Image (tube, grey):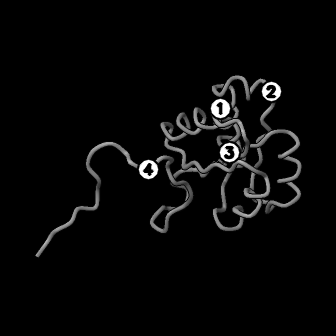
Amino acid sequence: MVQTTQGHRGPERRRRPRGGRRAGDREGFAPLVMLVGDQQAMMERSEAILAKLRFAVTTSASVDHAIRLLPELKPDLVVAGEMDAARIRRNAPHSVTIVVMDRGMQADPDALIQEILRTVRRTAS
């Protein structure tokens, strides 16, 4: 009988990590943050920082794609630029918290991360 392992060996082979909730995730285990935007370098850096802070992270390059994913993924927090955030707010469930990413946050992902942390703390209490 051949035995297989659940884990993988060697470096990660997937080009991009997969985001979203898994069936085994406990409620409240890690907030799911959806990053919406087309600035790939800033998105990747923010995603990496959030993942290190133990957030579940998913990304969307367009508002239309994000709106389609909202009912399925049920993110706790959506981060988007000013114009995109307004459009998402009109289409998102009321339970979703939206963080508006201003120009300062776009230039400095660390400022974005700090705002996300403040928002998560505020909504958790």
Residue at mark 1: 42
**Image height of 118 relative to 96, above or below:** above
- Nearest to N terminus: mark 2 or mark 1: 1
Q: Give, as a three-letter code, the residue at label 2.
A: Arg
Secondary structure category for the residue under label 2: helix
- Nearest to N terminus: mark 4 or mark 1: 4
Question: Where residue 11 appears, x then y in whole percent?
Answer: 33, 42
Q: Give, as a three-letter code, the residue at label 1.
A: Met
- Quarter the N terminus occupies: bottom left
Residue at mark 2: 103
**Image height of 106 relative to 20, above or below:** above
Question: Where residue 111 appears, x then y in whole percent?
Answer: 68, 26
- Nearest to N terminus: mark 1 or mark 3: 3
Q: Are marks 2 and 1 in contact (CB under 8 Å)?
A: no
Mark 3 packing: few (<14 Cα in 10 Å), some, or many (20+)?
A: many
Residue at mark 4: 14
- Mark 2 or 1: the one toward you: 1
Secondary structure category for the residue under label 4: loop
Q: Give, as a three-letter code, the residue at label 4.
A: Arg
Question: Where residue 31 appears, x then y in whole percent?
Answer: 59, 50
Q: CA distance from mark 2 to mark 1?
A: 12 Å
Question: Where residue 15 appears, x then y in whole percent?
Answer: 48, 47
Residue at mark 3: 35
- Mark 3 or 4: the one toward you: 4
Q: CA distance from mark 3 to mark 4?
A: 19 Å
- Nearest to N terminus: mark 3 or mark 2: 3
Secondary structure category for the residue under label 1: helix
Q: Residue furthest left?
A: 1
